[in-house]
Amino acid sequence: MKGGLYVPIVKTLRVDAPPHSNMTPQEMIEILLDAESRDPNTLGELLWDAYGQFDKGFPIDNLRPLLSSPSEKVLGLGAFLANELGWRARAMIPELAELMGSSNAGIRFNAIGALTDCTTQEHGEILGKLLQCLEDPDSGVRWRVIEFIRLSGSGQFAMAIRNAASQRPNSIYTELDLSFRYSRTVTEIMVRQLASHSHPGLRLFAAGLALRPRKIIDENFAKIVLEAGEPEPCGLISRAFQLHAVPTSAEFGRVENSQMKDSSTSGVFRGDGHLKKRGAKRQAPSQTV
């Protein structure tokens, strides 16, 4: 399970809860649709069981009523399930796209997580709207967009920028489009300019770009963001390396050579998201998105 429900019911979820063995999957869905009148503890246990049924092959179309309910509580349950199901929820892309406009930050959080896994470059309009959530008022939602920048495929990444720029002319997305339209080469200069930009959205974009997997992840890119000193982007970089979320070798998923993952041994990285000085920096090669 991915974790990170980001709605109040998180306190009621139990991975050790006994399954509702006497219920059919459809009966589980019907109870979830009646969430407003149900005991939260029962809903929390049932949600895991419903996830298990989808995981075993219960038709994904049965998730649709949870994503189109007039009840915010039901929408929250549906968005959580979609996020956990990942690419298997791709038939729900239109409904998930609508949920990015929810007034509930938890619903937006889970919808963006699901769309990161479900969308392709063919969903340009939706990807453009997703990228604009860099300016969301909720920090958790902004983190989800950074994860999209970090994990999206090259086609997703390019179409998100292009469509955000067309949807918001003369905006920060126009600047990004001009930077990436004719070249996908990422340099230290580009990361440095974004990390020190006057707009907070572009400073966050720099954090995602610095963590974006290539054949190898160049830690100099991450250090540039740390040196800029902006708390939120620094925190994103910090958490990624401390939790080993970013492999030094993206191709093989290894982190053992990272100087930044262990502050007790490297003398370079501090848990507060700042960089300790350690001699001259080497010149990093250009990277391709």
Image: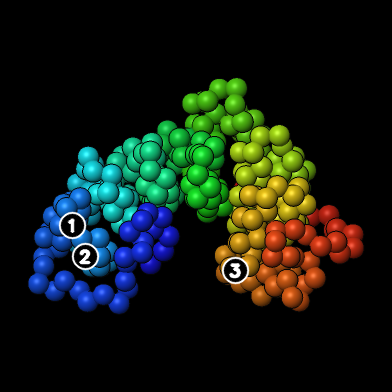
Q: Nearer the viewer, mark 3 or mark 2?
A: 2
Q: Provide the residue designation for mark 2.
A: 42
Residues at circles 3 and 2 in contact by the CB criterion of under 8 Å? no
Gap between marks 1 and 2, in whole Å? 7 Å
Q: Residue 98, can we see it?
A: yes
Looking at the picture, tell me which residue is in the foreground, 85 or 36.
36
Q: Provide the residue designation for mark 3.
A: 244
Considering every residue shown, the one lying at the far right of the view is 279
Residue 256, relative to residue 127: is it above or below? below
Residue 270, relative to residue 8: is it above or below? below
Disc 1 residue type (three-letter): Arg
Quick one: SS at disc 1?
Answer: loop
Residue 1: image location, x then y, percent? 38, 67
N-terminal of the pair, mark 1 or mark 3, is 1
Gap between marks 3 and 2, in whole Å? 34 Å
Residues at circles 1 and 2 in contact by the CB criterion of under 8 Å? yes
Residue drawn at (73%, 71%), measured in percent from left and top? 263
Residue 158: image location, x then y, percent? 54, 40
Gap between marks 1 and 3, in whole Å? 39 Å
Quick one: SS at disc 3?
Answer: loop
